[in-house]
Image (cartoon, rainbow, N blue to C red):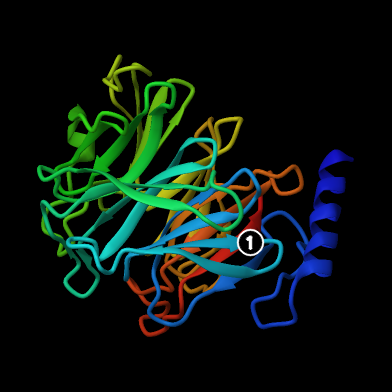
């Protein structure tokens, strides 16, 4: 009964608040039902997503250094910042919340055309929404010249001001203290290194911490893995485990009961991976445009959308649907 009331409430809000445009909210019919929250112009690649406590979504763009805030209940998008005037900031990538309404995100140079990252171009930035009204403060925290391709990021210890960041080219994980700027390599394993013989050099990608483990994906090798970590240092406290193979995930969201919802960029899909190892397709598919080029995912934070996974997409730019179709990157709400 509670689940039905949540779905009904989200349905009512979507109908009442959605504007009458092509990307307006559509009602959820059943589990796996999806509707587009907001879609950008062709050529736009949404890379990562975080959710504010007020329910708004923060999305980073990899095709240009822009951070947007999207209201999923009114289907609107507002530019938060554009780093186009900054050196070595052609793209924005991973983003995570470090304190209430304070988020940190990755900036660096990644070329979609070359399918390559520029080493030594990466830095970490902060955006603070605790300034009242629409005013927010954006500032650089630290540059990591030793990094080759900073990609995914997750908070490690918010009290200590530390985050973990995946380096997809070097096949390792950095720990950064956003207060002091100090950083070091804390995790490195064979399961994190890039696949051989591929045009795109890409190893470990999305990372999340859940129940004392760091979970991570390695898309081009099709691995979904985890390792127990010390929640203060970020270093491994046990063996590395391969949980799933043949799972080309780009990123994922973890539910409170340990279910991973994995975005498959090349597969245009969102897949459910249960704690027991069960797998099922939730939305999309190889020849589907529902989540064409799914890149990242996050759960809603308001009581009425906590059962909704918001998926960002690249519009199929990395692997066009049916070999030819691409579209503007978008955010899709999926009932799980």
Classify mark 1: helix, strand or loop: strand
> Residue 91 location in percent, x, y?
28, 63
Figure quadrant of the N terminus: top right
Q: Percent from the top left, x then y, of residue 177?
A: 29, 29
> At 35% from the left edge and 38% from the top edge, which residue is drawn?
216
Residue 38 lies left or right of residue 329; in this view the side is right
Q: Where is residue 111 in the image (x, y as percent from the top left)?
A: 21, 68
Is residue 244 in view from this perspective?
no
- Decide: is 237 above or below 165: above
Name which residue lies at 49% across and 22% down.
Answer: 211
* 109 left or right of 134 in image: left
Residue 329: tell me if it is visible.
Answer: yes
Dividing the picture into quarters, in which one does residue 96 lie? Answer: top left
Count of labels in the image? 1
Dot 1 crowding, Cα within 10 Å, few <14, some 14–19, many 20+: some
Q: Name the residue under label 1.
A: 71
The image quarter in which residue 192 lies: top left
Above or below for 280 versus 227: below
């Amino acid at each position: 009964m509670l689940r039905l009331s949540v779905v009904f409430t989200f349905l009512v809000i979507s109908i009442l608040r959605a504007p009458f445009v092509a990307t307006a909210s559509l009602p959820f019919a059943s589990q796996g039902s999806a509707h587009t929250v907001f879609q950008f112009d062709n050529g736009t690649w949404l890379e990562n997503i975080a959710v504010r406590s007020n329910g708004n979504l923060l999305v980073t763009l990899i095709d240009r250094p822009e951070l947007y805030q999207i209201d999923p209940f009114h289907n609107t998008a507002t530019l938060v910042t554009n780093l186009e005037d900054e050196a070595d900031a052609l793209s924005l990538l991973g983003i995570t919340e470090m304190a209430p309404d304070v988020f940190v995100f990755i900036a660096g140079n990644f070329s979609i055309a070359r399918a390559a990252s520029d080493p030594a171009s990466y830095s970490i930035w902060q955006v603070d929404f605790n300034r009242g009204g629409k005013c927010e403060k954006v500032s650089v925290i630290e540059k990591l010249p030793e990094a080759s391709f900073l990609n995914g990021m997750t908070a490690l210890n918010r009290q200590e001001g530390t985050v973990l960041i995946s380096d997809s080219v070097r096949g390792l994980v950095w720990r950064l203290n956003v207060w002091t700027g100090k950083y070091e390599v804390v995790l490195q394993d064979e399961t994190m290194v890039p696949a051989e013989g591929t045009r795109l050099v890409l190893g470990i990608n999305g990372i999340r911490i859940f129940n004392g483990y760091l979970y991570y994906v390695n898309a081009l090798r099709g691995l979904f893995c985890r390792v127990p970590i010390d929640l203060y240092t970020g270093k491994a406290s046990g063996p590395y485990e391969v949980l799933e193979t043949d799972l080309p995930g780009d990123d994922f969201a973890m539910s409170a009961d340990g279910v991973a919802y994995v975005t498959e960029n090349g597969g245009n899909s969102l897949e459910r991976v249960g704690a027991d190892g069960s797998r099922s397709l939730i939305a999309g598919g190889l020849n589907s445009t529902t989540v064409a080029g799914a890149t990242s995912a996050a759960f809603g934070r308001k009581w009425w959308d906590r059962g909704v996974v918001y998926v960002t997409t690249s519009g199929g730019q990395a692997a066009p649907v049916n070999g030819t179709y691409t579209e503007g990157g978008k955010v899709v709400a999926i009932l799980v």
